[in-house]
Image (cartoon, rainbow, N blue to C red):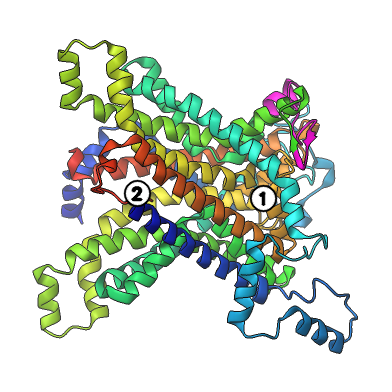
Amino acid sequence: MLAFILRRLVQSVAVLLVVGLVSFFLFRYVGDPINGMVGQDTPASEREALKQKLGLNDPAPVQFLHFIGNAAQGWFGLSYRTSEPVNRMILERLPATLELSLCAALFALLIGLPMGVYTGLYPRHWSSRALQAVSLLGVSLPTFVIGILLILVFSVMLRWLPSFGRGETVNIGWWSTGFLRWKGIEALIMPAITLGLFQLTLIMRLVRSEMLEVMRTDYIKFARARGLTNRAINFGHALKNTLVPVITITGLQLGSIIAFSVVTETVFAWPGVGQLFIQSVQFVDIPVMAAYLMLIGLLFVLINLAVDLLYFAVDPRLRGGGLARSGGH
Amino acid sequence: MAQWIARAADSDIWWSFKSSATTVIAAAVTLLIIVVAFLSPVLAPHTPFDPSSLSLSDGLKPPVFVGDDGDWSFPLGTDDQGRDVLSSIMYGTRLSLEVGFASVVVAMLLGITLGLFSGYFGGAVDSVIMRIADVQLTFPAILVALLIDGIVRGILTSQRHDEIAVFVIVGAIGLSFWVQYARTVRGSVLVEKNKEYVQAARVIGLSPVLIMFRHVLPNVTGPVLVIATINLGLAIITEATLSFLGVGLPSTQPSLGTLIRLGNELLQSGEWWITLFPSITLAALVLAVNLLGDWLRDALNPKLR
């Protein structure tokens, strides 16, 4: 087990280094770092001096090490657009995105899992068929269309929920939370549903097909023959054995939720890192793009690691030493 | 020809197609949308993106079936510039389909080529290609596409970028979806390359490129076709999302996503038809294509027969 975790750690670091390399190339060669710091009429000699001072004349590998070293300490330079430090811009907006993603993930999991179990246990019931048909719609509707439809119905027509922003937030240290005010929670409802709906349908369809498969196996028949209650069979035996793929997909989806918040945040003018990223793509604000890339890379690697560790908790076969699967994608 | 049709009508695929009502409807809807979109210069009542044909006095008319302000020459209403929503949708759908098809082709060509090389040569070539694929899979395709678009914007001026926006988007989406093809093709090539016909081809001295494309490729096309159909829906959604975010096609060349973005700005003031009708068209198109993809995947899977 230790060897497995070590190997995954080494792989994670390798992935992060490659992502860092891409970020570095973006940072160094796509935009001109000097142009972002000086005025248009700065003489060439001053630019050269600044270049020397910032180490931009060093050989590329040295610069790369420097970049990685700074990144590890959270320093990504100044934004070309606002001239603020990139790390502060991202930190200010991170709570908004994390709270939204957390709510969306909980929504997807807490509703998708029971729906999947139900439609898997009673596949022929009319309500299961209806849910299955609706889920196909959920997979086919683009996220932003769902958001627009929700705004049209609940903000424009019914006027129940706000259509943009975070409502009211409370600051706890540097973390601004929307959970402590009714206005903040109200503002969270539609974005969280929009962001979580795709994942909900995905989890539901996955759990359903896994349940259908497990219910056909011999050990379920045997459990029935032993006279166990339906509840013990459905949840103790069947559901538990569907969990490994469900954890993998859910974990990977958590990463996608954070990435897809780019779209939801744009629809609802949600002041998070996704919105910041879109603005920086439009303004070619390279330092912010590079930092966002590193942040998402780090999150994905951490989530993948957590998923791998969860396997050990869920699947006793893995604890026995012999590794049947190496996890990952 | 007649013989060929008879063979097709007798095949398993045709039978499985006929016996699924959902699939037949999905195919009909897809076909209808494609035909109407590509005939839009003939069928559309207006030419919405020719500025000389627009009149601001036609602006913001509601659809004919709502209220009394409707005008039968603009059945689905008009936007703030006086553009006919129905005609915009027809032209926009054509652009969405073109970008979708083109980016699937780019992803497929790139993925097949890299997958063939990776599987056939193995060794260092294989490791390099597959590690790139691993890292790319760490990020969702939409982020990769956004990033590529951002890089191109950094290199080009914004006016130049608008001129070639279609190509940038096709390239960006194509580059973000190649991994799946490459992995599938590589897997099949690993199986195929030890078979006798490949060894025979090698013995008579054919070049590796010829063996890969003429002999191995035809034997791995089934799974590739299935991925392509399923990815067509995804590519259309990705393009629409990018355009909606304002980094895709410009408003002078609007796809469905651009139309939804432009309409979304007027949603709050109650002009819902400008954004709702393109959204419905997009959802119907993607749903129909996805249903076809699901059916094709099951129909070509011998395990399910």
Question: Is the residue A95 above or below the residue A21 in the image?
Answer: above
Callout 1 amino acid: Leu
From mark 2 to mark 1, how far is it between C-alphas? 34 Å
Question: Magenta stretch: residue B59 in it?
Answer: no
Chain that bears disc 1: B
Q: Quadrant of the N terminus of chain B?
A: bottom left
Which residue is drawn at the image coordinates 67% and 38% (left, top)?
A: B275
Residue ID at (74%, 59%): A86
Specify whether disc 2 shares its chain with disc 1: no
Find out whether residue A158 is within the magenta segment: yes
Q: Chain of mark 2?
A: A
Question: Foreground: A284 or B21?
Answer: A284
Q: Which residues are magenta?
A: A152-175
State the residue at coordinates (78%, 77%).
A34
Q: Nearer the viewer, residue B289 or A57?
A: A57
For disc 1, the marked residue is: B245
* Label of residue A327 in the image: 2
Q: Secondary structure at mark 1?
A: helix
